[in-house]
Amino acid sequence: MDEEGQAAPRRDDPRHWPAAKREAFFDMLSVTCNVTAAATAGGVTARTAYRWRRRDADFAAQWSEALALGYEVLELALVGQALAGDDRDAIDRGGAPPVSVDLALKLLAQHRHAPGKPGRRAARTPGYAVPEDSDRAILAKLAVIEARRAKQAKDI
């Protein structure tokens, strides 16, 4: 049990994580883009969060969405500050800790090259064919080979 009397999440499965803590994690991640702060808000360690991201595709997708939102908010804050002629060295993000303009630019440059961004080839999740699909593909290739052999034998 945690300090709020809720069952602690199972270390191996984010689906057993209490909904309120899961929501707190993703909310904090979308506001700060900081995994350690988000993990603390969700009542888990950053290491556990990273492990869940590796093992659970749904969790990884929610993680990506939260980060994308966080970077979008950071970019809007940076542009808004620039258009307003505000030359302070820090960006006020309304409730989230301020971020230096230099750090914001570095983060946004890194994010621009992240997988899944426009212009990048999305990472493919490895998948496995069901036996019927693989059998069908193998038989189709064998048919092509047999047809080629028959044609070559006929031409000789």
Image (tube, helix red, strand yellow):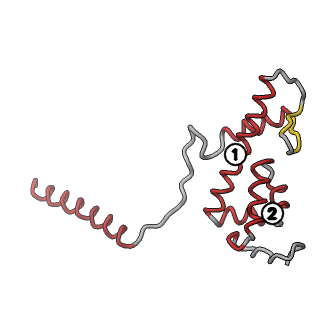
> Disc 2 residue type?
Gly
> Disc 1 residue type?
Leu
Q: Is residue 39 above or below residue 16?
A: above
In the picture, the quarter occupied by the N terminus is bottom right
Front in this rendered view, residue 113 or 91: 91
- Circle 2 crowding by C-alpha within 10 Å: few under 14, some 14–19, many from 20: many
Residue 16 in the image: state x and y as whole percent. Answer: 71, 74
Residue 11 in the image: state x and y as whole percent. Answer: 75, 74
Q: Mark 1: which secondary structure?
A: helix
Residue 120 in the image: state x and y as whole percent. Answer: 57, 41
Give the labeled residue for mark 2. 42
Front in this rendered view, residue 132 or 118: 118
Q: Residue at x 77, y 23 (%)?
A: 83
Q: Is residue 36 above or below residue 3?
A: above
Name the N-terminal-most of marks 2 and 1.
2
Quarter of the image where one finds residue 106: top right
Give the labeled residue for mark 1. 69
Outermost residue to the top: 85
Tell whether 100 sits left or right of 63: right
In the picture, the quarter occupied by the C terminus is bottom left
Q: How many labels were placed on the picture?
A: 2
Q: Residue at x 20, y 63 (%)?
A: 146
Front in this rendered view, residue 60 or 156: 60
Looking at the image, do the residues carrying marks 2 and 1 touch, with CB atoms under 8 Å apart? no
Q: CA–CA distance between discs 2 and 1?
A: 18 Å
Residue 65 in the image: state x and y as whole percent. Answer: 66, 51
Q: Is residue 16 above or below residue 40?
A: below
Front in this rendered view, residue 135 or 38: 38
